[in-house]
Image (cartoon, coloured by chain):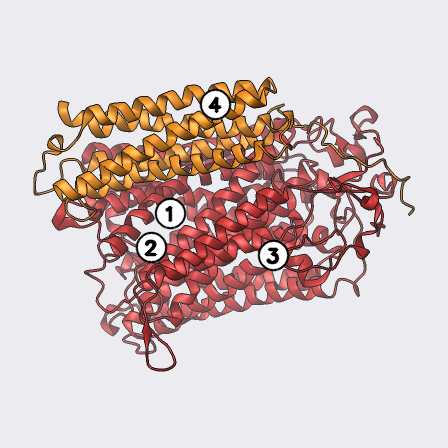
Amino acid sequence: MSNSAEASIDHGHHEEYTSTGIPHKKLCMWAFLASDCMFFGTLISTHLVYRRTSPESLDVTQFFDIPLTSFSTFVLLASSLLMALAVSSMHKANLKMTRWTLFGVIFCGLIFLGCQVYEFTHFVRAYGLTLNSHIFGSTFYVLTGTHGVHVSLGVMWLIAWLIYSFTGKMGPEHAIDIEVAGLYWHFVDIVWVIIFPVVYLVEYIL
Amino acid sequence: MESETTSVDFIGTESENSHVLAPTKKKGWIFSRPNANTTGIVDWLTTIDHKKIGLMYGMVALGCLILGGIEALFIRLQLASPMNTFITAREYNQLFTMHGTTMIFLAVMPLSAAFFNFIMPLQIGARDVAFPRVNTLSLWCFIAGAIILNASWLFPGGAPAIGWFGYAPITLKESYGDMGMSTDFWVMGLQVLGLASLLASFNFITTIINMRCPGMTMMRMPVFTWMTLITAFLLILAFPAITIALLELMFDRQFGTLFFNNAAGGKAIFWQHLFWIFGHPEVYILILPAMGIVSEVLPTFTRKPLFGYGLIVFSGAVIGFLGFAVWSHHMFTTGLGVVATSAFSILTMLIAIPTGVKIFNWIGTLWGGSIRYTTPMLFAVGFISMFMIGGFTGIMHSTVSVDAQHQDSYFVIAHFHYVLIGGSLFALLSGFYYWIPKMSGVLLNEKFGKFCFIIIFTGFNLTFFPMHYLGMEGMPRRTHTYHEEMGLDDPNRLATIGAFILGFGILFSVIQFFYTVINRKKLPPCGNDPWDARTLEWSIPSPVPVYNFARTPIIKARDQHWEDKYGHEELKMDYEPDDGHGVHMPDRSWWPLWCGLGILILGFGLITRKMTFHLPGGSTWEPNFEIFSVGVFITLISIVFWAIEGPGGYHLHPEDDIDESKN
């Protein structure tokens, strides 16, 4: 019933043991993304199911601005490239490069959000499309709005890491954190790659 | 087995102060992190120990089980005689809505979660779950959801009266007349409960896949752990559907969107699809943990390995997979068309195959075993027989033409109560009788336990067997009374008498659990392994020490503890060598509680947005987004502090109790 001998103080964290070799945070993020697929799947199906159900027809092509949306899509995709670079430079322990690329991701994310805010205001002001004016408004705003919330959370998450990188505490053990944030960011981009054709482009074809 | 925990090394503290003994650490309250030797109420509020979280899940859920039972008894009292005026039609609607919602989301699911939390990490030889603080947040979200849902009784409009399925358009603002905010409470309550389930499931998936001790391959895991994993996957894939459906409904009610507004092109039937895409996997979320418990209890009390382990695991996975492909069998009478209806009918019948495989494997386990009819064993055998009756009526429902006759009748009530009480609840009670010795260190009284089983079994069958006849006679569900001329008096009276017997039986059991746990110090200790059981959790002391395993076990066989006792020498368990670090323990934290509190406040804020409060002095106040914003602020701030605080941790040096645990 005696305590074992005093152990030496353990300041750092040793590499945590996992059965699969995949870090906990990464595995958990994959599980979350699986779940998030179902969230967006439900929202996108809602939008598609309700595309032609309204008694009042609405030609949404008159107010969609495809060049603008293509631009914001491109910016979001570019941010994915920068995010990949941020993860890579973090693994190489290049903190300066990580900061610059993270800043780039945040900047691109904010441009995307800005385009979305402009688009929403424009639709409401110029065309009177609101949440309750037409069912297209309900499904469009809730779907793209949920995606916008995901981008905003991602931006806030990355800003937190950018601030943290200036505290001097950021070390190689945080590479996994940036990688997990990257997984999330790429996923949110992929969702937009689906939303863009399924919500915007399809209106010109079908 | 008391271990001294005075030598604590705090990781991350800068100076030599890290050798300060824990009790002398500065006294703090809300904003300072509780230290390792915290006791009393602060310990329970800030704990991140999976065992304490499991116990709290269990206690709250047992309370909700009693609450839901009382609601059921009100329903049965009303139906005891024809044209009864004991409660009004409106109150009847509220009671069956709250009974259903409470029993599913606040009783059976969290009771399963209690076992997931307490038992699963012990079965895979883990220190804790992968994210202990997230686990605590899951508990507080569950409690916040329970509070929101039940607080509806106190507000204008009372409890929701829309059924546990909340079909549109009853839930829409235009059609609900004087129902006030009741539906908003239901929507918000389910959202918060969904968050709790999702957080817990991400955690359990990571834990089971990643934190198995060396040698614990997937096919050596106990079946209960396997079912935990499958249930967690069902939860993360099924809950998004209802979360989005509830979000759309919330937007319809709060911001006037048109998702379920038929006049503007919304479709009421779309709600049904979304609800049952969640709702059918939910059925398996309720039953798979029960199947896991039974698969642990049967081998123990037959002294045989589980018959067809691989098939049982595989069948569980197949049930989980097929569970996503059968949702429309809840909607056979809505006119989906011949092709869709036939396809869903066939898929539904297919589920009988893996379920039947499991039943035969359990019978195979019983066959030729040296059976001991202890209380957990009685409940487990009761589970097999009662679940089979529910399963047979389920196969009847899968036939579309038969289902059209059964739809919305008491036959359906009989079916799913046989599956949920005779199935899930019997297995959960079996789990309590089986594992409370591990949780408390004392055995439950066998004689009283068997007495409870007989009362519950009798009461259950008296209540629900007559409902098969009532349904066939055409008694409709969700109708608050019936005419004398319908000839439904006698079975209804029998069902009411049975319901009270069942209610008292469950009450006796719950009282026995609490009595035994509270008086555990006065009762004789049961030792590590009172049942001569087979899995890893029985190799450590009861009650389980805070650090679980003094040293990480190395597993060499499926029923490792059985091999340790009776197996070959080369299959006996090893332990990882002591590296001198001791056991790494994560620190307690206040932030999950604060985060849960923020979620509770933001939930209430959104519900009472349009409510007018009469302040003293005659003025009125409509909160709009004010309370909501406070809740969001508290939630975000606690997340920030949570992140800054970090996992922390200290090292425990338990005395080497490996030798004792081997006996």
Looking at the picture, which amino acid does disc 1 mark?
A: Thr
Percent from the top left, x then y, of residue B439? Answer: 70, 53
Are the residues flagged by discs 3 and 2 from a single subunit?
Answer: yes
Chain of the residue displaying label 4: A
Mark 3 element type: helix
Mark 4 touches mark 1? (CB < 8 Å): no
Mark 3 touches mark 2? (CB < 8 Å): no
Total marks placed: 4
Asked which quadrant contains residue B455, the reply is bottom right
Task: Say few, some or many: other residues with alpha carbon within 10 Å of mark 1 (under 14 / 14 to 19 / 20 or more).
Answer: some
Q: Earlier in the sequence, mark 2 or mark 1?
A: 1
Are the residues flagged by discs 2 and 1 from a single subunit?
Answer: yes
Q: Which mark is residue B393?
A: 1
Q: Which mark is residue B56?
A: 3
Looking at the picture, which amino acid does disc 3 mark?
A: Met
Looking at the picture, which amino acid does disc 4 mark?
A: Thr
Percent from the top left, x then y, of residue B279? Answer: 37, 45
Chain of the residue displaying label 1: B
Spatial CA span between label 1 and label 3? 35 Å
| Of the two numbered discs 4 and 2 in the rendering, the one whose residue sits closer to the viewer | 4
Mark 4 touches mark 2? (CB < 8 Å): no
Q: Is residue B479 left or right of residue B529?
A: left
Spatial CA span between label 4 and label 1? 61 Å
Q: Camera-side residue: B420 or B380?
A: B420
Mark 2 element type: helix
Looking at the picture, which amino acid does disc 2 mark?
A: Phe
Are the residues flagged by discs 4 and 1 from a single subunit?
Answer: no
| Colour-to-chain, orange | A
Q: Residue at x 31, y 37 (%)?
A: A42
Are the residues flagged by discs 3 and 4 from a single subunit?
Answer: no
